[in-house]
Amino acid sequence: MFRILAASLVLATAPLSVSAPATAQTAQLRAANFQTRQEVRDAQTYDRAIKDFQSRGYAGLTRHLPALRAAFDRMPDDYAQVVVQHETSVARLSDGGDVLLMMVMLSAPDDTGKSRAAITLANVYGDIALLLASEAVEGRRYDEALAYLDRALKIQPANWLLLSEKIVALQGAQRWDEALALADEALDSDDILLTLHDDAFHRRRGFSLIELGRLDEAKAAYEAALAIDEDDANAKRELDYINKLQAGAPPTAINFVAPASTTPPQPLN
C-alpha cells in the first residue's frame, strides 16, 4: 500500500478573462496590448507541451523540455503576478478559480472613488516553472525542481501553486521540517493570493506532520482543511490513515501520482 503525494499542477490558457463583457476577439486584442511578442511565443510553446501532457501524461513532455527550459530562462525579472500597465491592473493567474475575486478586487474604487480597468492573463512563465518543476518532482529530481521553483518564487512569492509544489518537492526529498515551515509561512501570510488556498496548505502541513510522527497535530491540520472545504476527499483520506496509525497499523510507503487535474480552466470572456 502507498500513501499519495500528489503534485499541485493546475494548468491555464491565456487570456483568462477581461474586465468587461467582451467577445473572444476583443479579449485577444486587449491581451495583446499587455504581452510582448516573446511572451506570446513562449505561451504557444507551453500550449503545445500541455496538449501532449493532457494526452500522454509526463511522457508527453519529454520532447518539449528543452523549449520549456529555454522559455523559462526568458522569464522577466519584473514578471509579478499583479502589476499596473497602461493605467490598467494586470493579474497573471494560473488558477481559474481566482479570476472573479481578483477582478472584483482590482477594479474596485480606491479611497478617492476612482477605479482602474483590470485584466487577467495566463501566468505564462509561472505556469512553465510549475510544469518543469512538476516533471522534475515526478522524476524524483528534487534539487532540479527546487531550482525552478526558487527562481520563480523570487519574482512571484505569493504564487500558491509554486509554493505548494515546493512543499511537495521538499517532502519528496524527506525534508519534512523545511516543508512544514514553508506551509506554516504560507498560512501566516495575509496575501489574498495565498489565503484563498489555505486548505491546500493545511493539507501539505498535515502530510509533513504525519511523517514527523506528530499525529495529533496532523489530525488538526486536516480538520482545518475540512473546515474550509467539507468535501475535501484528500483530507478525509488522510484522517482515516491517521486513525489507522493511532490504532496500531503500520505506516505505508509514499507514492507519487500524476496531478489530479490536467484540464485547463475555460476562459471567462
Image (cartoon, helix red, strand yellow):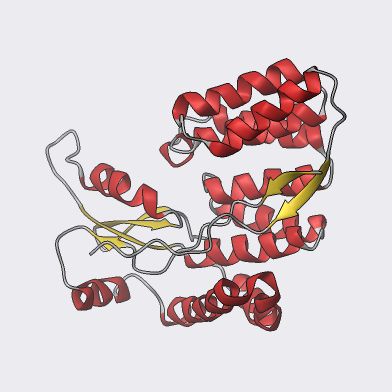
The residue positioned 53% from the left and 66% from the top of the image is 125
Left or right of residue 128, residue 35 in this image: left
Left or right of residue 135, residue 192 in this image: left
* Residue 28 visible in image: yes
- Residue 3 position by quadrant: top right
Relative height, residue 66 to residue 114 (above, below): below
Q: Where is residue 158 in the image (x, y as percent from the top left)?
A: 52, 44
Q: Which of 115 and 130 is in front in this view?
A: 130
- Residue 50 position by quadrant: bottom right
> How many numbered marks, from 0 up?
0
Q: Position of residue 96 (x, y in %)?
A: 38, 55
The residue positioned 71% from the left and 46% from the top of the image is 5
Relative height, residue 15 to residue 1 (above, below): below
- Quadrant into which the N terminus falls: top right
Q: Nearer the viewer, residue 241 or 37?
A: 241
Relative height, residue 84 to residue 38 (above, below): above
Q: Where is residue 48 in the image (x, y as percent from the top left)?
A: 53, 81
Relative height, residue 40 to residue 251 (above, below): below
Q: Where is residue 30 in the image (x, y as percent from the top left)?
A: 24, 72
Q: Which of 239 and 64 is in front in this view?
A: 239
- Quadrant into which the C terminus falls: bottom left
- Residue 260 position by quadrant: bottom right
Q: Which of 193 and 58 is in front in this view?
A: 58
* Residue 181 visible in image: no
Left or right of residue 16, residue 136 in this image: right
The residue positioned 52% from the left and 48% from the top of the image is 159
Q: Which residue lies furthest to the right in this view?
A: 250
